[in-house]
Image (cartoon, rainbow, N blue to C red):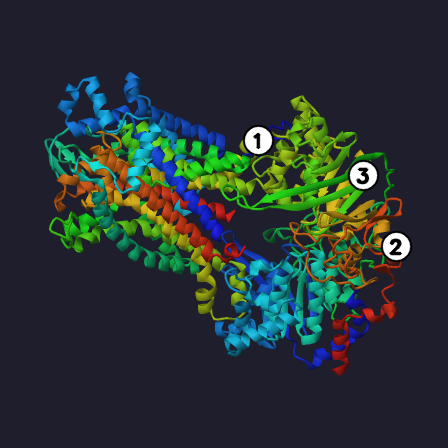
Amino acid sequence: MVKLIGRRLIQMVLIILVASLLLFAIFDTPEFKRRLAVQELGGFAVSALSQDAYNEWLARRGLDVPFYQRYFNWIGKIVQGDFGFSYEKNRPVGPLLADRLANTGILALCVFALMIPISLTLGVLSGMREGSGLDRSITFLSVFTTSIPEIATAIILTVVFALGLGLLPAKSAMIAGFDPWQLVLPVLTLVIYDFGYVARMTRASMAEVMTSQYIRTAILKGIPYRRVVMKHALRNALIAPFTVIVLQMNWLLSGVVVVEVFFEYDGFGKLLLEAALFPDVEVVQACTLVAVVVAVTSQIISDVGYTFLNPRIRFS
Amino acid sequence: MAVTSLSPPPVPLLKRLQKPRIAALIFAIAWLPLMAYVMAGDQLGDLEQYVLVPAIPAVILLYLICMAAFRESWIALLGATLVFFWFFIAVAAPYLPLIDPNKPIAPFTTPLTEKSGFFFWLGTDFKGRDMLSRTLWGCQRVLVWGVTATFVAYVVGTAFGLIAGYISGWWDEVISFLANVLLSFPVMVLFIVILNYLGPSGFNIVIAVTFASAPAIMRIVRGLVLDVKTRDYVFAAQTRGESALWIMVVELLPNVRGPIIVDACLRLGYTTVAITTLTFLGLGLQPPDPDWGLMIKESAKTAMLFKFSYMLLIPALSVSSLILGFNLMADGLREMSLRD
Amino acid sequence: MSMASDTSGGTAPAAQAGEGTSQIPVLECRNLSISYFTRAGEIPAVADFNLTLMPGESHGIVGESGCGKSTVALAIMQYMGRNGRIVGGEILFNGRDMRAMSEEELRLLRGSQIAMVYQEPMASLNPAMRVGDQLAEVPIYHEGASKEEALERARAMLESVRLPEPERILRSYPHQISGGQQQRVVIAMALLSSPKLLLLDEPTTALDVTVEAGIVDLIREIAAEFGTSMIYISHNLGLILETCDRITVMYSGEAVEVGTVEDVFEAMRHPYTRGLFASIPLPGADKNARPLIAIPGQLPLPHERPPGCNFGPRCDYFKAGLCDRGEIPMLPISGDDRHFSRCLRIEEIDWHAGLGEGIGKVATEKGDVVLKVDDMTKHYEIEEGALFFSGEAKTVKANEKLSFEAREAETVAIVGESGCGKSTFAKVLMGLEEATAGKVLLGNVELGHMPVDRRGPETISKLQMIFQNPFDTLNPSHTVGGQIARVIRKFGVEKDEAKVQERVLELLDIVKLPRDFALRRPRQLSGGQKQRVGIARAFAGNPAVVIADEPVSALDVSVQAAVTELLMDIQRENRTTLLFISHDLSVVRYLSDRIVVMYLGQIMEQGSTEEIFAPPYHPYTEALLSAVPIADTKVTKRHIVLSGEIPSASDPPAGCPFCTRCPYVIEGTCETEPPPIREFQPGHRIACHLSEETLSAMQPVIQIGDGTEKGDKGDEVSPAAAAESARRSDA
């Protein structure tokens, strides 16, 4: 068990290292260096620079040393908390990212708080009686909602609740300070898109457990059906959804980009996209690296959680 | 293999067309012209007008074949109907009586009104371009790039999955590790980074989708192969002295096909979402040709009134219906495969 | 030994007939019909099933797969799944119709009055719950016991099913204990509330034969100790003989014959029952003098059953116009105790004509040595933690110094239970693993250190294999003909395409399959047919040696005989050397010339078939012989039950591998020193520490005598049987 966690941690560090290397390498081209120069000195000044003066600028920025050195310098700075500078927003990346991550964190927290109970309940109800009317309706509903991409859900919700009924704000820019009402549409969009997948996984897992031989044993042992479900089935059926929910972090980080851009919510995803379009290389790198760390961490939690929940692995 | 002394009993036509090879041929007749039309329309010259003609009957025939093959599952039937509706529109768009989708006529015309001598069923957008025409033309690019990207991702993912699963050892360690690295990027983040690096275009979307999807496909195939390779027929092939390549292609690949096809349908849905979303974010296909993501992007700022919300709703519902089609098809296929 | 042969005989029927009038049966099924409802419509699983079970009686239900025997058990439990339903008849438990009971009434009955033991113990226990908690539920929910009280009861019950260290097992999760222990836990769970009726659905099928013997022993004792009525479902007639008073033979959803075990085994009155007995290798059957007689044809699919008698199309006595009309009722056999048969021609068939002797065959002359295995050893290194943590390496001794030889046209059987190393041995032989030490000589080619990719097509084609699982042996994606043709081309038997096709059709002829099977895909074939294709494929390259890895163990009894006979015929024809890997000593006795007995990677004993079945024995051989159930009332066996389980191959005992379970173990010697190999006859070798005198003084395990001789049983009367007769005398 400890050995397994140790192995996973080492793997995690390796993955983050390789991912960061890739990330650094693809933005380490002459073209991107030149763009950086344009951002720092202004386009006009750069075109007027002689080759020597440009080289001198490169040297001053530490961009003339060999690749591996540049990589270690970059990684070294990041480890010390220096994520670089955003030319678009004109402030250091570190605090900027922290602000935006906090906003996205609020969003994600609300999404999980809603999605987990909804999807687990629906999945369990559906899988308990496979093939029943309830099961069919829940399955169809979840196929239906996962088929509507976030962007379409966002549009439909906006049109109905904001433009049509006028109940909720259409945008979530929070210009006049934090307003919980502005969170409603983004959160709903993400929940509607995501819950179906988790519900279906829960259903599949529950259905498999309910047809397993040990459930038959439990029923034929004559214990009440409630206890069969609560004590025998749920424990085994929720192992798989648990890992799916944790891995859902990864999906959520994808969905967050669209939703934040559409609703103009100042979060991590919007920051990443704006930086990519500008392009604000150091912001893109920092955002991506954070996303990778979050994703890998959630993977580890899911793996370790799975082993912990599953006695077949825990004690062997 | 052919044994000449035997004559197969007569089979109904649709049943005979369901044979993989014939169905694949019909698909090629429908698909290749559409691919040429969308990817290299400019280079086709005069041919551009005629190239899609043979594809129209092929699509209809293909639909009938699917109807016959899926008749056991109404879910799959519904899914196939949605998908083939858009497939048909994609090949038939040039021959339908539509207004030029890129021609500005009368801005902000609401649906079902007549203006400037045209009747606009679905109204016009902020530039005055016909929504109906743009919506129908818009499916071409999503469909072609989505399917191509998924296909390429599958070829790459399956190849690596077979190698990692069958040969295992160090190959497996290395391939699985690289897959884990790629999977550690959230999909949309990976898309943004890759397209930011390569620049937005259809071909780059194919590359981005391959990087994002191939690792997951590889994992699925690897898992299936690990199961199938313990079967006695693989053992028999090994003891017969067959090469690893032969075993992977002839013994393993046909037996992991079923689950892969179901997954491919689902993934076609994801890819369609991704392409539309990327275009909406400004990283995907470029204007002016119509495209659902683009239509949403362009209208997102201007259509924020209930009166004009059709500009957003129409492309949103269109893309949803196509994805729903793929997902229902996947669901139906899975249900059918579980029954056997 | 057989309990039935020494208890019931003449007395039981009379006793039961007497009881039948005064007592209410524990369970009665009347004209029970069960159907499954699927997309394709109603599929009748069981029709017109009748059963009367008196208190204390044990009733066997025997039949091949798909005959509906498990469906009957689940119907008795009223647990039919979503699409199963009882469509006719009634099930009376203690005189009450279970179909009229509410869900709550059923719940109170299940687990307290009626309990069940299942085929796969591992799957039947909740993997995420401790054994103790699972056991404790029974007293808690049926008797309102407190948790402590319930756990204490569970511990006591684990003791009475003779599990060592009950405290530890209570705290374990199911996967932490062995298969045999799991099954004992399931039995303990079933017994915790002293049920009136115990249903056993193939309770030992998933277990090794020596472990099975222990469980069967336990079941017999339970019947005696608790006076429980039992329904024992099995495909194995020998097990039914050892455990039951009465038997129902099922075929294709119907009971075809019901009666006391003696009546059915000795005076069967249905052609199917008769065919079944003729197709199992009983002691006395011989591949040359008295070959097995297979039942022709195949089991009909549930929705393709013929009109009239379901067995009609396969029956020698089929009479058109009589057997294919209407429903055939169960007819009583006059003179016997409640003995019924579903056959209209009982009176016309000459049941004493014998089963029609099979056509005797001439024994083949053995040739020169073809395969020589010399001190072959295969060890695996298992390293814990592949990539980052290289833990301590462990050595698994899969094969340890194997030496034996096989001659041309000879059948050598390799016998052993799981973990004995027979599949590793096959892998080394086939070139998928390299031997760690020693030699394997095929002719004069050394194979032990030559992996398959370095062997020429000539060598590869000389050595072929037939696999165990018919569902795995053929690639489902390719046609049957294509798969055989590939072998022919690969080994260069024929080059010309037309000739390859010609050869494919010839091979199909040889394995007695229609030629149009060449175009079929494996899923269109039955298990037996797939196995025939597997045989055709193995013989396509004209091999000198064929390894057959349990080729018939996954097939139904009536199909087994046909496939076994086919294999023997082809072997005779081609003078092939056959290495027959099996755990089933009955089959092995029937078809092999020499036997190699393996245990945990080592050869314990080898010799000719006669030498193995007669003393001196290796203690393991002795136990194995005693453990195999034999479906013959005339056979008496010495009763030897091994304790414990087979140790893991990664952690074998230092000395003799069998020392942990050996009843003759010599303390201080067997655990530490590897046993010496002694030769008793030329070729008959035993690896054991026991002195020559001790080994030579052993008594035969299996004795074939007249069924009526019961005097010489002595202390071998089982406790179950003793209790049974005691109970009867009370009544």
Q: Secondary structure at mark 3?
A: strand
The dot on residue A299 is none
In this rendered view, identify the residue nearer to me: A241 or C335.
A241
In which quadrant of the rendered image does the C terminus of chain C lie?
Answer: bottom right
In the rendered structure, which disc, 3 or 2, sits on the residue that comes first in sequence? 3
Residue depicted at 87% across the width and 37% down the height: C365
**Chain for numbered disc 2:** C
Q: CA distance from mark 1 to mark 2?
A: 52 Å
Q: Amino acid at mark 2?
A: Glu
> In the rendered image of this protein, does residue C96 appear above or below residue B61?
below
Report crowding for label 1: few under 14, some 14 to 19, many 20 or more residues within 10 A (C-alpha). Answer: some
- The verdict on a common chain for dots 1 and 2 is no
Q: Secondary structure at mark 2?
A: helix
Residue depicted at 67% across the width and 65% down the height: C232
x, y (%) of residue C120?
60, 58
Residue receiving disc 3: C406
x, y (%) of residue C209?
71, 57
Report crowding for label 2: few under 14, some 14 to 19, many 20 or more residues within 10 A (C-alpha). Answer: some
The dot on residue B244 is 1
Residue depicted at 80% across the width and 74% down the height: C11
- The verdict on a common chain for dots 3 and 1 is no
x, y (%) of residue B207?
35, 30
Residue receiving disc 2: C692
